[in-house]
Image (cartoon, grey):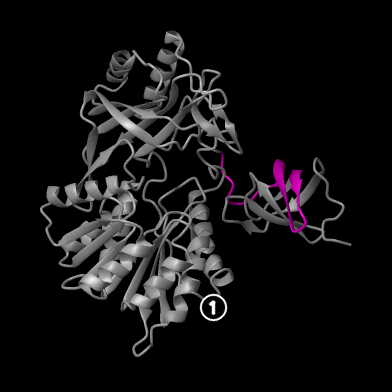
Amino acid sequence: MTPGAMLRPGDQVELHVDRLAYGGRGVARHDGLVVFVTGAAAGEVVAARVGRVRRSYAEAEAAAVLVPSVDRVVPRCPHFGPCGGCTWQHIAYPAQAAAKEAFVRESLARLGGIADPAVRPIVPAAEPWFYRNKMDFSFHPDGTLGLHRRGDWNRIEPVEVCYLQSERSAALVRAVRAWARERGLAAFDPRTHDGVLRSLVVREGRGTGERLVGLITSPAAFDAGAEFAAVVRDAAPDATAIVRGIAAGAGDGAPVTRVEVLHGRDHIEELLAGLRFCIGLETFFQTNTPQAERVVAHVADRAAPAGRLVYDLYCGVGTFALALARAGARVAGVELAAASIAAARGNAARNGLSGVRFTAGDVRTALPALVAELGPPDVVVLDPPRAGAGGKVMRKIGRVGAARVIYVSCNPTTLAGDLKELLPFGYRLVDVQPFDLFPQTYHVEAVAVLDREPGEVRR
C-alpha cells in the first residue's frame, strides 16, 4: 500500500511533530507519509485537519494541541494565526533561532551534498520585536487596510496592532484606514482594474529617526493627495517624506513608475555600519538595521579587503560595496536595476568613497566584462535574490577563480543548490554563519565563505 494511502482531505488525525521545516510548518508522519503541519511546534502531539494530499506528502492544520511542546508560548499579537505577517509567534524565540540554524545545516547537507557542513552558531536578534524598518500594508476592495492573510493572498487582515514595526506604525495604519473609509476612496480591484488605493508603505530610518510614508495608487485620477498628507502629519508629525507612488500593473508586485512628493522630500536617510544611505519608496534595503550591521561587519571581516580587488555582485544600493571600499578595497559593484546603481553611486559620494565603481547590468554578462577590464578579483561577494544566483552565474564565478567567494543568502535551499554548482571549480566550504534578521518568521540569512584550493585548475 502507498504510504498514507488512506489519508483524505478533511480527515482529522493525531500527529507527533518531530521538527520544524523551512517554510515554517511542523514535520510529522502518518503511515509513512510526510505531513507538513501548520501551527505546530517541534516535539508536540496535535490533532490536525488534513488539507491537500499528494503522492509524497500531505498538508494539515493543527486543530488542537494534545501534548504541547516545551517551546510553545502564548502569541503576543491578537492577529496571529489569520495574519500572514508572522508564522512563529507560538514558538519561544530561542527555539526559533535554533530551528533556523538547523535549516541551514540540513539544506547544505541534503540539497548541497556537503557532508557535515561547518555551520557556526546562529547570531540571534537582540530584539525579536518591533525590528522591521519597512512594512507594506494592502488595501482590499472591501475597504480593509492591513496585512495579507496567511495562505490566502486575496484576503486582508485589518490589523489594529503589529509587533513587527514600531508601535507608531500601527497608529498610522489606523488613521489612514479611517480616512479612506470616511472619504469613500475605493481600493484597486485587480480583477476589474477599478479603484485607486493599492497599498501603504511605511519606512523608518532606525539610525536617523526619519520616516517615509507612501501611498501606492493606480494611475487613476486622485485629488486627495493633500488630504492624505495632512492625515499622515496628524498621525505622524515626524514624517520626513510623504509621497504617492503610481503603479499600473494588476498584481500586488506591480512596480512603481512615478513618485509624487506630497510633503517633505522623496526619500529618507538611514545609518548602517557608520555609512549613510538614501532610501526611497522602492529602494531595496535590509529590513532589520541592527542585524544587517552585523552581517556587513562579518562580510568585511571575512573579505580582509585592504588592498584587494573585490567584485560585489547583486550589489543593490552599495551596502557591502561601500563598507568594503571604506576598509581599503578596490570594489566593482554590479546590479541589474539601473535605479539601484544610481542610488549606489549617490551613496558612495554621500560617504566620500571614491575607490568603488558601479555598473548596471546582468551579472552573467557584466562579470566577464569586468574581468576583461580589471582582471580576476581576489574576492567575490554576492547577495542574490531569494531565488538564488543560478547555475549559469555560479559557473561563471567558478571560472573567474577568485581566491575567496562570500555568498550572502536569504534562502538556505537556493544557497545549497548554488554552492553545489561552485564546489567542482576547486572550492571548499570554509564555514557558514547564520543570522536571524526575521524573528517570528522562518526566514534566515546566512553568509557562506568558500576558498579556492591552491593549484586547482579552473573548469
- The answer to whether residue 56 is magenta is yes
**Position of the C terminus by quadrant:** bottom left
Instruction: Name the spot of residue 209 as percent of width and height, x first.
Output: 23, 35
Left or right placement of residue 144 versus residue 300 in this view? right
The residue stretch that appears in magenta: 47-74
Left or right placement of residue 184 versus residue 113 in this view? left
Q: Residue furthest bottom?
A: 455
Q: Main secondary structure of the magenta part?
A: strand
Q: Is residue 254 visible?
A: yes
Instruction: Name the spot of residue 180 as percent of width and height, x first.
Output: 43, 15
- The answer to whether residue 71 is magenta is yes
Residue under pointer 1: 115
**Which secondary structure lies at badge 1?**
loop
Total labels: the figure holds 1
- Crowding at dot 1, Cα within 10 Å, few <14 / some 14-19 / many 20+, comes out as few
Instruction: Name the spot of residue 330 as percent of width and height, x first.
Output: 18, 67
Question: Relative to residue 188, is residue 414 depicted above or below?
Answer: below
The structure residue drawn at horizontal position 22% and vertical position 53%, both measured from the top left corner, is 273
Q: Nearer the viewer, residue 85 or 357?
A: 357
Three-letter amino acid code at disc 1? Ala
Q: Residue furthest right?
A: 1
Question: Relative to residue 58, is residue 265 depicted above or below?
Answer: above
The structure residue drawn at horizontal position 49% and vertical position 74%, both measured from the top left corner, is 117
The structure residue drawn at horizontal position 31% and vertical position 49%, both measured from the top left corner, is 290
Question: Relative to residue 431, is residue 131 depicted above or below?
Answer: above
**Position of the N terminus by quadrant:** bottom right
The structure residue drawn at horizontal position 32% and vertical position 46%, both measured from the top left corner, is 285
Instruction: Name the spot of residue 28 as percent of width and height, x first.
Output: 71, 56
Q: Quadrant of residue 43?
A: bottom right
Q: Is residue 304 visible?
A: no
